[in-house]
Every structure is written in C-alpha cells, then in structure tokens.
Amino acid sequence: QVQLVESGGGLVQAGGSLRLSCAASSDIRSINVMGWYRQAPGKQRELVAQIGSGGTTNYADSVKGRFTISRDNAKNTVYLQMNGLKPEDTAVYYCNARVIRVAAFYDYWGQGTQVTVSS
C-alpha cells in the first residue's frame, strides 16, 4: 500500500508558476512509475507527466516545454514544476504511483490538489 499526499496547488494568474509536491509513504525507488494526472470539470482524468524509476520522463503534448516532473528519492517526493500556466491548466491535479508486478500493476492515488489559473 502506498499513500500519497499532494500539496502546492492554488490560484495563480496566467503566465505564473506553481510547484506541486507529492510525498509518498513508501520508498519511491520501489515504485516503477510516478506521475501527475489532472481532471477538469466535466472532463476525464488525463495524464500530465510521468517519471520512471530510472528517471525517464513522459509529458502530455499540452504541457511540453512548460512543465517539468522530477523526483527526490531521499525525500520520497515527486515534484511538478509548472511554468507559463494557462487558464486551460485549471484542474484538480492528482499524484499517481504505479507498481508493476509480473501479472498485474497497482495504481495508487493522492487526494488531489486544486490548481486554478485566472486569465
């Protein structure tokens, strides 16, 4: 079982920056993939960024060049640095941890943190 706690959301003007943090209850070196997803009102949850245990990253096209995902293994924490924020980035952001086993994978989620970007 992995518990995730997000922080760092808030209200920011367009063009501004925020940094989200996700603290895990387990050693994140044992977690195969950690990521950030977001869900806007009336829309499905979508992938924002992922980082593998080896440091490989993956981003949604809509955030490439603006967002950066990183991990601090010593602190069991994953970050999402968001620059150049746009009103369309407004959503609840969720931290995800995926543990991959031979026959299955397990997803764990945080409670979410609200990000609101005003125009």
Image: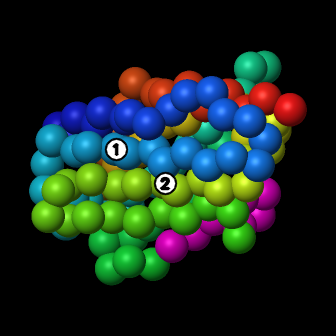
Quarter of the image with the C terminus is top right
* Circle 2/circle 1 CB separation < 8 Å: yes
Residue 80: numbered disc: 2
- Percent of width and height locating residue 36: 51, 48
Identify the residue at the far right of this view: 119
Whichever of callouts 2 and 1 sits on the residue coming sooner in the sequence is 1
Q: Tell me the distance, in whole angstroms, between the alpha carbons under discs 2 and 1.
A: 9 Å
Q: Please give the range of residues in magenta.
A: 57-64
Q: Residues within 10 Å of mark 2 (few under 14, many from 20)?
A: many
- Percent of width and height locating residue 64: 71, 67
Residue at 38% x, 61% y is 33
Residue 22: numbered disc: 1
Q: Quadrant of residue 93?
A: top right
Residue 8 relative to residue 78: left or right: right
Per the image, label 2 sits on a secondary structure element best described as: strand
Identify which amino acid the numbered label 2 is placed on.
Leu
